[in-house]
Image (spheres, coloured by chain):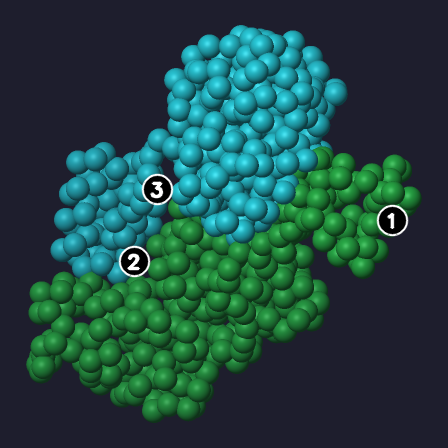
Chain colours: A green, B cyan
């Protein structure tokens, strides 16, 4: 297949136009892989890692290719080749490149200057490449926080998503989300609203606005932020591609926050990826009577998500390692007991204070001395009064 | 002091009437200790554990008592004796006994048949005794769940406290709480409402209805459940005694659930005791916009509380050890991709399904065979259709 692509001058020109920083054969091979393999295909990832995209493509698509060395288990490879071959069409590669050209999408290849290193945590399941409309530099800018949640969100969820995303984007964070209705849309819009940076990771091609109702939102994100996909232009979003896309959101976010989610929401899937990648995971609690918060509570219960209720708590997800419980400086128990025994109205003798508080007279007198210095108590005749306004 | 008490036939009669199962000198010594020491006094606890209540009282209150063996550090003991002496009044012991008699409170002493073993987890800080109006057997009945929360609760909190307490008490659990306004009251009332068992642990004497507005509620609990305190009849609730009382709620509950709590609510203190006693701790989430849920969210963040949203989840606190995340049985990724490629309207040939799904034709045919057996797909001409109604 690679040989045929390299004989096609139209394909070569399109590849050069889409990505000038790499050799044309590598660009064409990457796009071919992107057409051949579904997102997250680990056999493809392993083969490309072993042989490089050009040689791997030869092995995958040329009938007479010789497997040396046969590092990938031969049987898995044979099965994979069977599933790649039905898609091995030079025309599909050309279509994808033309599609990218039409929307001025940039090709971001592994190992390139714009390739987000965070994706490499996905190992052989990393994307074979990314298609990016807008500012590809945002994929590596820091900090990056994924804010995701239910499509069928409530007003409560929309409000919080907007508040968090607006605060975070306003202070320089890149807000990553999935471009969907509901929480995703609220997060993107709030980031744009404060003139901040936001990235939408789509399940279909970047030339397809999905959902349709977000056509103008996605267009705006493509201009002011970035719209990104790991599947070629022209590809329809499918359930599998949504599930796969979720791992990219989790990988790209330095922390993931689920604002609102139903029990089986796709956001649970994103959260699961974040957790298994070791990324900090936050969940926003809500009323237990709200179905759209049940997924968040599930994350708190079963996924060890951290409960986040403010923008500051979200920032803590990546800014600090988990610290010790922030207990209040415990009040001295003896002082509490002595204060209980005092009155603001009546002067009470130390002897009586000792009886009331269960402390010794000596101790009471020592504590009264301290409290007097603090202005918390005052002598009055033969006794002591608590000063008005003192705790 | 003990000698003087034993010379007082009125005191002896009152002690016999209040607690017939123990020697009169032990009963009197216990009540004397209860009058002398504030709740949780560890020096008193250690001394009683070493010498027994009668001999410990002699050491504490008789000027000529000889300390053999001096197991408690002499300095700590000397300081403690100084704080106990101002309260060493036989009349106070008699008053406490008469107070108990007036409200028919029972004396429950450590080591007795009715003594709740759970209290012994508090070690030297365990109560020197308990005063109980009502059914003291409830203190050892199982399961026991503490349901606590803010006095200034919201309708949301009251509703959930009532729902949880009603469900739990209705299925045989003993609902423990603190008798306060708000969440505590809602929990007690719901337990009574279903004819279930409930225990109110007060910070003051059991003869004092606190808060005043709960006079009739506490009276009803004393008849149908139990009203319990570790301080003598006639004792006023103070801030110190509230804080101390909280440790008893935490110790008595086999699990503690905080339904609603402000950031600095006393329930946080109860929860802290539960956590440090190793008792399972649950917190009910709520809107992040609600101040009365902020303490619960704090417990989820900083105290490792478990997020509980249903009665079943509360039961899990004590019924099961923490299990593995209950993930859904993951759908086979290849099946998901094949289902994406199928249509309910148009029959699609296996070759085309392979191209759409990115699976090999062999694999597609194998999966179609399985799905056909399940009734999820049907052959149609040269292709396959997804059956209507199949997921």
Identify the chain of the residue marked 2, using the numbered disc in the image.
B
Callout 3: SS: loop
Q: Are marks 3 and 2 in contact (CB under 8 Å)?
A: no
Image quarter of the C terminus of chain B: top left
In the displayed structure, B364 sits above or below B286; it is below
B338 or B2: nearer the viewer: B2
Q: Residue at x 15, y 78 (%)?
A: A59
In the displayed structure, A354 sits above or below B133; it is below
The residue indicated by pointer 2 is B356
Q: Residues within 10 Å of mark 2 (few under 14, many from 20)?
A: some
What is the distance, in whole Å, between disc 2 and disc 1 at their CAs? 89 Å
B189 or A80: nearer the viewer: B189
Q: Residue at x 59, y 21 (%)?
A: B4
- In the displayed orientation, state which residue is furthest to the front: B64
Q: Kindly report which numbered mark, 3 or 2, lies closer to the viewer in this rendering.
A: 3
The residue indicated by pointer 1 is A379
What is the distance, in whole Å, between disc 3 and disc 2 at their CAs? 43 Å
Residue A237 at x, y percent in the picture: 42, 57
The dot on residue A73 is: none
- Asked whether the residues under marks 2 and 1 belong to the same chain, the reply is no
The dot on residue B322 is: 3
Q: Is residue B22 shown left or right of residue B127?
A: left
B106 or B258: nearer the viewer: B106
Callout 2: SS: helix
In the displayed structure, A344 sits above or below A121; it is above
Identify the chain of the residue marked 1, using the numbered disc in the image.
A
Residue A313 at x, y percent in the picture: 59, 59
Q: Is residue B15 visible?
A: yes
Q: Is residue B209 shown left or right of residue B63?
A: right
- Asked whether the residues under marks 3 and 2 belong to the same chain, the reply is yes
């Amino acid at each position: 297949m690679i040989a045929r692509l390299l004989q096609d001058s139209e394909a070569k020109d399109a590849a050069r136009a889409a990505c000038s920083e790499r050799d044309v054969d590598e660009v064409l091979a990457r796009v071919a892989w992107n057409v051949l393999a579904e997102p997250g295909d680990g056999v493809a990832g392993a083969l490309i890692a072993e042989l490089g995209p050009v040689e791997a493509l030869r092995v995958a698509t040329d009938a007479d290719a010789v497997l040396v060395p046969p590092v990938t288990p031969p049987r898995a490879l044979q099965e994979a080749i069977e599933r790649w071959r039905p898609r091995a069409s030079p025309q599909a590669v050309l279509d994808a490149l033309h599609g990218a050209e039409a929307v001025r999408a940039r090709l971001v290849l592994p190992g390139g200057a714009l390739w987000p290193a965070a994706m490499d945590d996905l190992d052989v399941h990393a994307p074979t490449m990314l298609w990016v409309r807008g500012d590809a530099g945002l994929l590596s800018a820091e900090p990056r926080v994924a804010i995701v949640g239910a499509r069928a969100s409530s007003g409560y969820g929309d409000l919080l998503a907007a508040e968090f995303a607006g605060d975070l984007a306003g202070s320089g964070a890149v807000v990553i989300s999935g471009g969907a209705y509901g929480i995703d849309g609220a997060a993107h819009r709030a980031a744009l609203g404060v003139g901040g940076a936001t990235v939408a990771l789509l399940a279909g091609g970047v030339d397809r606005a999905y959902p349709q109702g977000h056509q103008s939102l996605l267009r705006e994100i493509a201009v002011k932020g970035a719209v990104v996909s790991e599947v070629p232009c022209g590809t329809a979003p499918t359930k599998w591609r949504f599930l796969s896309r979720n791992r990219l959101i989790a990988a790209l976010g330095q922390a993931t926050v689920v604002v609102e989610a139903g029990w089986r929401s796709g956001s649970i899937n994103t959260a699961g990826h974040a957790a298994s990648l070791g990324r900090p995971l936050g969940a926003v609690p809500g009323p237990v009577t709200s179905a759209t918060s049940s997924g968040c509570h599930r994350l708190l219960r079963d996924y060890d998500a951290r409960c986040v209720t403010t923008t500051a708590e979200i920032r803590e997800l990546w800014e600090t390692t988990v610290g010790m419980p922030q207990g209040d400086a415990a009040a001295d128990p003896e002082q509490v007991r002595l204060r209980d025994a005092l009155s603001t109205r009546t002067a009470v003798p130390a002897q009586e204070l000792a009886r009331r508080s269960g402390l010794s007279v000596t101790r009471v007198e020592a504590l009264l001395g301290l409290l007097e210095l603090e202005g918390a108590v005052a002598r009055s005749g033969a006794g002591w009064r608590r000063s008005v306004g003192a705790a």
